[in-house]
Amino acid sequence: MSTANAAHSVVEPSAGTRRFAGSLVILYAVITMIPLIWIVLTSFKSPDDAISYPPKVVFSPSFEGFCNLFTTRSRQTPEFIQTLGPPQGLCDSIARSRNMVVAGPSNYVPRFVNSLIIAFGSTVLAVALGTLSAYGFSRFRVPLKDDLLFFILSTRMMPPIAVAIPIYLMYRTIGLSDTRLGMILLYTSVNVSLAVWLLKGFIDEIPREYEEAAMIDGYTRFQAFVKVVLPQATTGIAATAIFCLIFAWNEYAFAVLLTSGNAQTAPPFIPIIIGEGGQDWPAVAAGTTLFLVPIVVFTVLLRKHLLRGITFGAVRK
């Protein structure tokens, strides 16, 4: 074997190192997926199977959890149920098997819609404002730039719930309590600092020569920003949007304190789903399973931008 073929790069990992790293990644993925898989399985269990001990891994699938999630039920006597017509669908049939009737829809769908509007609305605003601010810090001479950036970063050092009481009093005074607009503005204000810091790093990687060439060709500064900088910063915008959306989508403390009905989101609603005799765990698991779907879909749709790397668009020298 020649010396050239036997030489080993100090940068390229060895086969053993790659196998070890791959094993760690697979192990980590399996461990983190077990709770999610268990939640999905519980959503298809009956209430009795959900609380059985030892826990059942093999069971007969049931849609009772989803029916209980989307409907409200009331207990009736068997004599009254016999006077009714045939069951109107699967959920009505399941309810009657437990001597109950479907009284109407639950509040899960309105709460889920509130989560969609508030989370995506605040994400769009935070990313838009963060992109403009990050561009200004990256391209212009801003007085006390370092101090301002540190001040923006310092807003993330304090847990948001620490200012919950002042925000609650302020919102109650100005009429933003229990409103979608109030929650969108609140989540936007919390996420803007994160968006500025993340996007500034991405925009710093984009060479100024691109914008200068565009402005020499007759573009205005804003046109150069829209047509040159934004396409190059797609990776950073996608990553920032995901982080902002995850915070707004999962936020619980502010939602509990500032909403109670009209603007209540899904996180505070899911834990209070009460079934007959206690917590309806299949319905809770069903609501959690459906609650995970938008985040997964949003991340999958943006994965191609995330995989491009933060140096996408850099000038090779």
Image: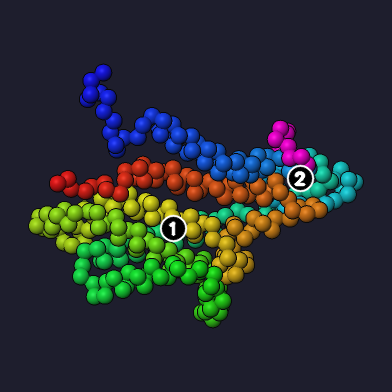
Amino acid type at image mark 1: Cys
Residue at the far top: name it: 1
Amino acid type at image mark 2: Ile
Tag 2 residue: 51
Q: Is residue 162 left or right of residue 148?
A: right
Residue at the far bottom: name it: 173
Q: Is residue 27 left or right of residue 147?
A: right
Q: Looking at the rendering, which quadrant does residue 172 occupy?
A: bottom right
Tag 1 residue: 244
User: Tag 1, which secondary structure?
Assistant: helix
Q: Position of residue 15 (x, y in %)?
A: 38, 29
Find out whether residue 306 is within the magenta segment: no
Chief SS of the magenta region: loop
Crowding near pointer 1: few (<14 within 10 Å), some, many (20+)? many
* Residue drawn at (58%, 47%) of the image: 290
Boundaries of the magenta span = 53-62
* Residue drawn at (62%, 60%) of the image: 268
Given residues 65 and 316, the one toward you in this image is 316
* Residue drawn at (37%, 61%) of the image: 195
Q: Position of residue 111 (x, y in %)?
A: 59, 58
Between marks 1 and 2, how big is the CA–CA gap? 35 Å
Mark 1 and mark 2 lie on one chain; the one further toward the N terminus is: 2
* Residue drawn at (59%, 58%) of the image: 267
User: Tag 2, which secondary structure?
Assistant: loop
Given residues 106 and 130, the one toward you in this image is 130
The colour mode here is rainbow
Crowding near pointer 2: few (<14 within 10 Å), some, many (20+)? some
